[in-house]
Image (cartoon, grey):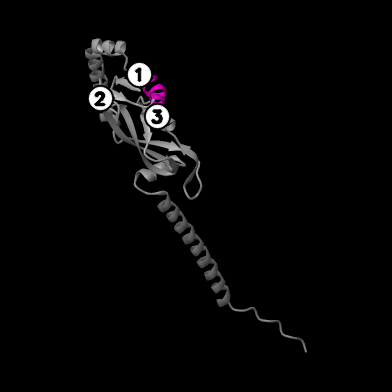
Amino acid sequence: MQVILLERVAKLGQMGEIVDVKAGYARNFLLPLGKAKTASEANLAAFEAQKAQLEARNLETKKEAEALAEKLDGQQFIVIRSASDAGALYGSVTPRDAAEAATEAGFSIDKKQVALIAPIKELGLHALAVKLHPEVEVEIKMNVARSQEEAELQASGKSIQELAAEEEAAAEFEIAELFDDIGSAASDDDDAPAAEAPAEES
């Protein structure tokens, strides 16, 4: 199926190009999202008539996207989730969660603009791509933690494994100290003079 691209589409082409695509891709994605029109004679004529207007609108939205990109690129957003001791999430963090976290922080982002580089199924810092415009993309990070405190520690560069190892070491140290205290108390008892047995009456 041939379509005219109304904007730049990754791996397809630039605005105004006529490209061949699968009918399902056109019907389910390109046409309903306004990224393309079927390449009929009427649509070609309409596109040529509106080309200057479309290019001007594209330039304006690109400038807006670039302004937002300067503020958004490299930002880190915290998402609090329940997880196992090993750091595996009970569920996952979705593009919707990322968009909501960014929007709450004052950035207007739609979940459709967020692309997960890999599924987020464990605690830690995760990179995501945000497509603000067909020609403008930035990277943000999701700080997925069980608590605000844990998120702050992760942001400082500590992984869940390191935090767990530190907690385990601290617990082992406390246990060792407890046993030392018990051992020294027992040793004090051994050093104490034994009570004299009462003399037997003859």
Up/down of 200 relative to 95, above or below: below
Marks 2,3: beta carbons within 8 A: no
Q: Nearer the viewer, residue 180 or 190?
A: 180
| Residue 14's disc number | 2
The image quarter in which residue 142 lies = top left
Q: On the rendered image, what quadrant is the C terminus found in?
A: bottom right
The quadrant of the rendering that contains the N terminus is top left
**Residue at the disc numbered 1:** 34
Instruction: Compare marks 2 and 3 and give the one earlier in the sequence.
Output: 2
Q: Nearer the viewer, mark 3 or mark 1?
A: 1
Q: The residue under label 3 is which amino acid type?
A: Ala
- Bounds of the magenta segment: 23-36
Q: Position of residue 92 (x, y in %)?
A: 47, 38
Of the two numbered discs 2 and 1 on the same chain, state the one appearing first in sequence.
Answer: 2
Badge count = 3
Which residue type carries mark 1?
A: Gly
Is residue 30 in the magenta section? Answer: yes
